[in-house]
Amino acid sequence: MNFDNIKDKMDAEPMDNIQVPQRMEGIGSRKMPIQKVRKTMRGEIITQLICIAVFFAVPSFVEMYRLPKSLYYMLMFITSLITLGYLIKMSWFLNKTSNLSAGSKETVVTFIHDLQLTLEVYKTAIIAGSLLLPFSLIIFLLGIEHVDESIFTKFILLDMSPLMLLIGAVGYIVLAVLIYFGTVAWSNSLYGVHIKKLEETLKELEI
């Protein structure tokens, strides 16, 4: 076999028509949604921790009656536990996906699956915690010493007319519905678009 002739033929062939496979070209773009999801989660964890600290610190700067202050701290403690639950889940997700390269179909499938599970915990925790916040805020406002303490007592004992009770119940239900749809919309705006891009990546990898 004449290797010199083979080499000469290879050198003579034009290299302009050689195309890089699309699957190789797309690897960099596949990493982007994963990096953006991780960056968003890190920012959200920090933001939530700051919010928890602020909520607990506020009563220290305002004069409150003892009972409403105690109830406020109890509700915020429960809300914080719920919040910390999904923050731990987010931290687990970030740790698990820290070394993903997005270079294979299995990697993308695993990332999407874990992300969707994490988001379900996220939505549930946000909704549960947010439903307690209105009570915390009302107790805080009614518990300030500049407000008549009897107003707080009537609120806690539900000492009000049936009409006011009905208005309060309907208002809370409306608020709960708004919180639910707001949470879903917020989650989709932060992560939904990246999930769609990753699902498109799966289709490309199957070609």
Image: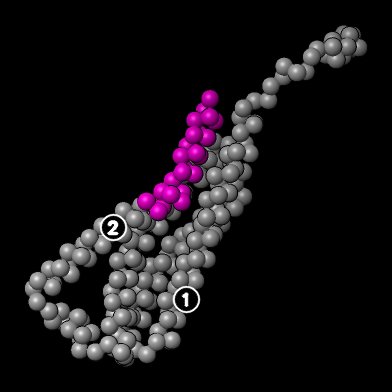
Mark positioned earlier in the residue sequence (1 or 2): 1
Residue sitting at 40 percent across and 57 percent down? 122
Q: Above or below — where is 85 with respect to 66?
A: above
Stretch of the chain drawn in magenta: 185-207
Does the image show residue 38? yes
At label 1, counting other C-alpha atoms closer than 10 Å, the crowd grade (few under 14, some 14-19, many 20 or more) is few
Q: Nearer the viewer, mark 1 or mark 2?
A: 2
Going by the picture, which residue comes out furthest to the left?
A: 162
Q: Is residue 116 visible?
A: no
Residue 34, horizontal then vertical, whole percent: 55, 46
Residue at 15% of width from left, 79% of height from top? 158
Name the image colouring.
one colour
Please check the rendered image and state whether residue 198 is part of the magenta-colored stretch, yes or no. Answer: yes
Question: To which residue does mark 1 refer?
Answer: 53
Residue 152 in the figure: left or right of residue 42 = left
| 89, 14: nearer the viewer | 14
Q: Which residue is mark 2?
A: 178
Q: Secondary structure at mark 1?
A: helix
Q: Which mark is residue 128?
A: none
CA gap, disc 1 and disc 2: 25 Å
In the image shown, does 33 or 203 lie closer to the viewer?
A: 33
| Residue 10 locus on image (x, y percent) | 83, 14
Percent coordinates x, y for residue 8 in the rendering: 88, 11
In the orientation shown, which residue stands out farthest toward the right? 4
